Image (cartoon, rainbow, N blue to C red):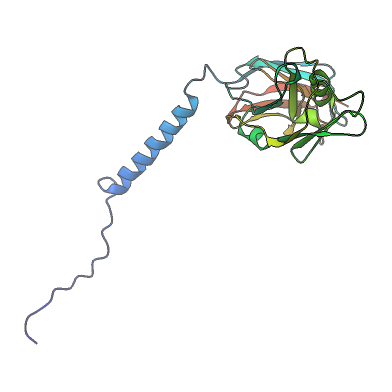
């Protein structure tokens, strides 16, 4: 056999941990992560801070603990609420998610004509407003009040009537709320998600306490607010029987 061929048993090139491209790739990934983190924080005035809880009654271990208000600063982190406006002028009703953030965009509302009294019922993220049959319908003020008072609807929705609210609301096909921006808002006590009832602001979160299963009387429970992925320092609450 004439000639010769050179063989090598060397495997594929492995980048040097310090000099090779693997280290450079890690630096690039780290830079991208930091840029993403700074982008999320851009425009914020500060982190959420809980300064206290105003309690209508003390947090309860075994039964719902009454109406409370979480007080603080930048509690919403500038997030936007999903919403949809039905009608115009004095017949308008704006229905909003009662928690900010993108999760509210999955909520939906429809307005139907009924044969009896005005009702507002939420099931599986869909709010159904059934207008009163007499004396000819339901005003915007009445519809908003029904939504905000509903045992089911008020846990996810908050409504505002337009203008004087004196005109009658028209039926409307089901539509999703839109415009929610951010990761959302969570209030937990003893690790248990609490009910936000009403419309939260940057300085106030209205809340109805949920029973603290597993807690005992005189235990100290932590209240934690997480807003747009950022968690505030916890505050301590005394649990009662």
> In the image, is 192 to the left or to the right of 133?
left
Q: Position of residue 73 (x, y in %)?
A: 62, 15
Q: Residue furthest front?
A: 136
Figure check: 200 above or below 63: above
Q: Quadrant of the N terminus?
A: bottom left
Q: Position of residue 227 (x, y in %)?
A: 61, 27
Q: Residue furthest left?
A: 2
- In terms of image quadrants, where is residue 47? top right
Could you say which is closer to the camera, residue 128 or residue 38? Answer: 128
Q: Quadrant of the C terminus?
A: top right
Instruction: Identify which residue is drawn at 58% across, 22% down.
Output: 77
Q: Is residue 98 visible?
A: no
Figure check: 30 above or below 80: below
Instruction: Identify which residue is drawn at 52% across, 16% down.
Output: 45
- In terms of image quadrants, where is residue 177? top right
Q: Residue furthest top?
A: 164
> In the image, is 240 to the left or to the right of 100?
right
Could you say which is closer to the camera, residue 194 or residue 43? Answer: 43
Instruction: Identify which residue is drawn at 28% across, 48% down.
Output: 21
Q: Position of residue 80 (x, y in %)?
A: 60, 25
Instruction: Identify which residue is drawn at 92% across, 23% down.
Output: 135
Could you say which is closer to the camera, residue 205 or residue 14? Answer: 205
Q: Is residue 223 visible?
A: yes
């Amino acid at each position: 056999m004439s000639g010769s061929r050179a063989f090598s048993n060397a495997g594929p090139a492995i980048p040097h941990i310090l000099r090779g491209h693997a280290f450079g790739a890690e630096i690039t990934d780290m830079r991208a992560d930091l840029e993403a983190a700074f982008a999320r924080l851009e425009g914020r005035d500060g982190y959420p801070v809980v300064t206290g809880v105003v309690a209508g009654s003390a947090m309860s271990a075994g039964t719902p603990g009454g109406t409370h208000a979480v007080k603080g600063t930048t509690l919403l982190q500038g997030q936007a609420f999903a919403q949809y406006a039905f009608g115009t002028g004095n017949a308008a009703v704006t229905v909003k998610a009662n928690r900010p953030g993108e999760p509210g965009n999955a909520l939906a509302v429809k307005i139907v004509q009924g044969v009896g009294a005005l009702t507002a019922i939420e099931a599986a993220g869909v709010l159904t407003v059934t207008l009163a049959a007499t004396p000819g319908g339901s005003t915007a003020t009445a519809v908003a009040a029904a939504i905000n008072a509903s045992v089911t609807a008020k846990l996810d929705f908050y409504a505002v009537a337009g203008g004087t609210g004196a005109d009658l609301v028209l039926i409307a096909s089901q539509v999703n709320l839109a415009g929610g921006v951010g990761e959302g808002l969570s209030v937990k006590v003893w690790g248990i998600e609490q009910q936000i009832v009403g419309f939260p602001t940057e300085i106030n979160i209205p809340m109805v306490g949920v029973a603290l299963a597993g807690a005992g009387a005189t235990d100290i429970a932590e209240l934690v607010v997480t807003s747009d992925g950022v968690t505030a320092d916890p505050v301590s609450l005394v649990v009662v029987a």
